[in-house]
Amino acid sequence: MRSVTPLYDSKWVKLAHADVVLPSGEHNPRHHVVTMPPAAMAVLLNPDHTAVLMSWRHRFVSDVWNWELPGGLVDEGEEPAETIARELIEETGYQAGSIEHLVSFEPMIGMVTSPHHVYLATDAQHVGDPTELNEGRFQWVLLAQIPALVAKGDIRNSGTLVGLLHYLALNGGPESA
């Protein structure tokens, strides 16, 4: 990128034009660039590692109901693992005894930058009632049900898909998890 011209800036999204020269040599002086804050989410497992805590929630922009992992935006100056520890308590009332990084990814890498960090959370203890009340209805979902929920379209959130499928792939699928 030669230069970036800001067009819009809020705490949720930044939009800019970038002056870029592509690998072919083609010049594009108005390539759109969208920047969104980093996010973190957790695959929180029950004690015997057969179920994951998920929220059934509505997303109004896409008008979709789907299962999602707990998580949220990384606050300024906060490490993603700290975000997970905070969000688990706020959204679910659980505190994880162990939080381990699984994978980081960019959900829309072509024109949007928004790093997403997925963690495995285990050894959780219920420490109180959730304080965030608009996060949907949380319940334990059997890992063996995840492939069918994905196939049915009941899991659409990119972080949830990446986190669960990554965990299942590393652990030999839902039957051995």
Image (cartoon, rainbow, N blue to C red):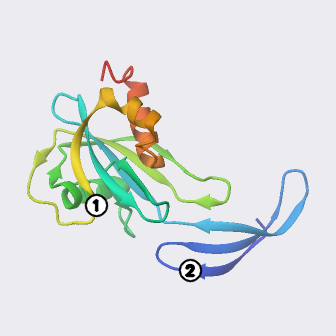
Decide if residue 106 is on the left or right side of residue 102.
right
Quadrant in the picture for residue 171: top left
Tell me the crowding category of disc 2: few under 14, some 14 to 19, or many 20 or more residues within 10 angstroms, Cα based.
few
Question: How many circles with numbers are drawn on the protein?
Answer: 2
Decide if residue 16 is on the left or right side of residue 65.
right
User: What residue do we see at 67% from left, 74% from top?
Assistant: 16
Q: Position of residue 97 (x, y in %)?
A: 17, 43
Element class at badge 2: strand
Of labels 1 and 2, the one closer to you: 1
Residue type at mark 2? Asp
- Closer to the camera in the image, 57 or 108: 57
- Closer to the camera in the image, 168 or 96: 168
Tell me the crowding category of disc 1: few under 14, some 14 to 19, or many 20 or more residues within 10 angstroms, Cα based.
some
Residue type at mark 1? Glu
- Closer to the camera in the image, 160 or 17: 160
Disc 1 to disc 2, how far (Cα)?
A: 26 Å
Q: Residue furthest right?
A: 25
Q: Which residue position holds label 1?
A: 135
121 is higher (above) or lower (below) than 173: below
Element class at badge 1: loop
User: What residue do we see at 23% from left, 54% from top?
Assistant: 137
Q: Position of residue 145 (x, y in %)?
A: 32, 30
Q: Position of residue 41 (x, y in %)?
A: 36, 50
The C terminus - image quarter? top left
Decide if residue 31 is on the left or right side of residue 120.
right
User: What residue do we see at 40% from left, 46% from top?
Assistant: 118
The N terminus - image quarter? bottom right
Q: Earlier in the sequence, mark 1 or mark 2?
A: 2
Label annotation for residue 115: none
Q: Which residue position holds label 2?
A: 9
Q: Are marks 1 and 2 in contact (CB under 8 Å)?
A: no
